[in-house]
Amino acid sequence: MDGDLLMAFMRIIHLSDLHFGTEEAAVTAALRQVIQSAGPDLVAVSGDFTQRGITPEFRAAQAFLGSLGVPVLSVPGNHDIPRYNLWQRFTNPYKKYRQHIHQELCPVLERGGVVVAGLNTARRALPHWNWANGAISADQLDYLADVYAKSSARYRVCVFHHPIHEAAETPIDTVVFGARRAQEALRKLKVDVVLTGHVHHASITTLGDDGHKTIYLSASTALSSRLRGQNNGFNMVEICDGELAVQVFTRGPGGFDVMESHTLRM
Ligand SMILES: [Fe+2]
């Protein structure tokens, strides 16, 4: 069947930087409730499930995801690699992530005319003083090209932790090794939407020309008490035949509410 002849629709809740270990129970309950009310087709999590990459934090994250009752596609963040256990960091950095969150570090999901691909940008070590930064390798871009080539879906979404785009008012600088090459590859692959986290700051950035535009969405931290200028929040993204509707939810006194709504042409 030709995917272009079918109506494409997917409602995605984009969560990031949950940082279990720093969360408050009331905020977690409010987040669960608003997600369940929204009835998404998919919850996409762009990394940092935990604060220190330890088992109790992974267990709490696993329980939260399990309680949502909807499909989840996720990638690891830098905080999901053990921080203090250096032996495990170097010998088996994603062991706990695979055990508690998902076996696959670069998962793929396709439905409703939309294909969503995750990439793991977190590394056990980097040629940089700050190993919290990230990387995208040439092999990962080849993998991504292969995923999209095998799919007939009309819209292409990519999820990873570290942002490779420059957004206005970003609260921290992020170095991503291979960022330029990745941005160029995503343009050539005609990726429509990129979902990232790490900076704890929601933003929308459109890159590209009249030939093709890629919309980069960053999410605030959903649950962490470590805020960087923005309150806890998440994005709701609806892909529907040429339009991308984005609702930015922010936590207020009564729970999570829509603070901004945008409709963008794709
Ligand atoms: Fe991070």
Image: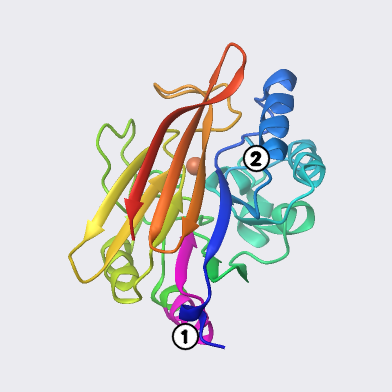
Q: Are marks 1 and 2 in contact (CB under 8 Å)?
A: no
**How far apart are the two marked residues, 1 and 2, measured between alpha carbons?**
31 Å
Instruction: State how the image is colored.
Output: rainbow
Residue drawn where x is 56% and y is 58% of the image: 10
The reply, left or right, for residue 239 in relation to residue 52 is left
Give the vertical position of 79 relative to 201 (above or below). below
Q: Nearer the viewer, residue 67 or 141?
A: 67
Can residue 133 be seen at all in this image of the molecule?
A: no
Tag 2: residue type? Answer: Ala
What range is drawn magenta here? 142-159
Is residue 118 magenta-colored?
Answer: no
x then y, percent, for residue 2: 51, 86
Task: Determine which residue is flagged by label 1.
Answer: 149
Quarter where residue 189 is shown: bottom left
Classify 10 Å Cα crowding around label 2: few (below 14), some (14-19), many (20 and above): few
Dot 1 or dot 2, earlier in sequence: 2
Q: Which residue is mark 2?
A: 38
Residue 13 drawn above or below residue 227: below
x, y percentage for residue 34? Answer: 66, 32
The N terminus, quarter of image? bottom right
Q: Look at the numbered disc 1 and give the secondary structure of its residue.
A: helix
Does residue 146 show up magenta in the picture? yes
> Residue at image x 57%, y 51%?
12
